[in-house]
């Protein structure tokens, strides 16, 4: 077993799992507060292109991981639709439009399709990062997802270098720092809210004693 195959397996596990804490949090707490609708659509469009690219290039770990991430992103975007943060046609339009665009570009040149995926995918976290910096309520943001995103980004960077496909590595130069910032800010917010809730519960208990 080679280093590349071990790293590919690790990337596969991380790629399959990193997006799901956000899905779980959104549906468990029934909140999408702190999630940027524009950022989610941006990320979804990039994920569609990466999924198409991975299938065209037959990069098996990347292919499987992107399929799982795409599924998770669709579920989170569907929650935004359900909470009336965006219309359904935005979700359907991005899925259909970027799938057609990705397939069409891949037929012309897989390399060009890959660069489109890089530009859109790498910048997809920026609207969410800006939203988190400006938005006060981060109750719907999953700290676990963004923490795993950092580890996932580092692993895929190394894997891209190992297989000689730097298109796999480049997006993480933007994704990793942004994910670190988002997870840190959400952690501070959610811990503060947890302490405030505990203090309020204690005060209410003392008042009724």
Image (tube, rainbow, N blue to C red):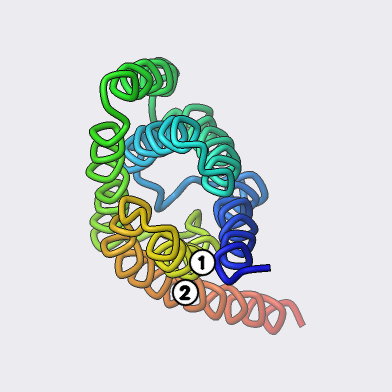
| Furthest-right residue in this view | 209
Name which residue lies at 72% across and 79% down: 205
Q: Position of residue 204 (x, y in %)?
A: 65, 75
Name which residue lies at 28% across and 50% down: 122
Name which residue lies at 33% across and 71% down: 181
Q: Which residue is mark 1?
A: 143
Q: Position of residue 145 (x, y in %)?
A: 53, 60
User: Quarter of the image holding residue 195?
Assistant: bottom right
Q: Earlier in the sequence, mark 2 or mark 1?
A: 1
Q: Position of residue 150 (x, y in %)?
A: 44, 68
Name which residue lies at 41% across and 34% down: 53
Q: Position of residue 159 (x, y in %)?
A: 46, 63
Q: Residues within 10 Å of mark 1 (few under 14, many from 20)?
A: many
Residue nearest the viewer, comparing 22 with 9: 9
Would residue 192 be visible to someone looking at this image? Answer: yes
Closest to the camera, between mark 2 and mark 1, is 1
Q: Residues within 10 Å of mark 2 (few under 14, many from 20)?
A: some
Would residue 90 be visible to someone looking at this image? Answer: no
User: Secondary structure under badge 1?
Assistant: helix
- Determine whether 132 is above or below 74 in the image: below
Labelled pair 2, 1 in contact (Cβ < 8 Å): yes
**In the displayed structure, does residue 35 sit left or right of residue 75?**
left
User: Secondary structure under badge 2?
Assistant: helix
- Determine whether 149 is above or below 53 in the image: below
Q: Which residue is mark 2?
A: 187
**In the displayed structure, does residue 22 sit left or right of residue 126?**
right
């Amino acid at each position: 077993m080679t280093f590349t195959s071990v790293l590919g397996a690790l990337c596969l596990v991380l790629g399959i799992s990193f997006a799901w804490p956000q899905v779980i949090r959104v549906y468990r707490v029934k909140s999408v507060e702190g999630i940027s609708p524009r950022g989610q659509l941006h990320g979804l469009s990039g994920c569609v292109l990466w999924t198409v690219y991975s299938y065209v290039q037959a990069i098996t770990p990347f292919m499987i991981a992107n399929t799982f991430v795409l599924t998770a992103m669709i579920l989170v975007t569907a929650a935004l639709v359900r909470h009336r943060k965006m219309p359904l046609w935005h979700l359907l339009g991005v899925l259909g439009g970027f799938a057609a665009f990705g397939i069409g570009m891949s037929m012309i040149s897989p390399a060009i399709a890959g660069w489109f995926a890089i530009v859109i995918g790498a910048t997809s976290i920026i609207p969410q990062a800006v939203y988190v910096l400006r938005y006060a309520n981060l109750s719907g943001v999953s700290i676990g997802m963004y923490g795993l995103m950092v580890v996932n980004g580092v692993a895929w960077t190394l894997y891209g270098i190992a297989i000689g496909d730097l298109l796999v590595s480049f997006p993480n130069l933007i994704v990793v720092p942004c994910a670190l910032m988002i997870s840190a800010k959400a952690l501070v917010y959610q811990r503060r809210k947890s302490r405030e809730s505990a203090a309020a519960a204690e005060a209410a208990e003392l008042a009724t004693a």
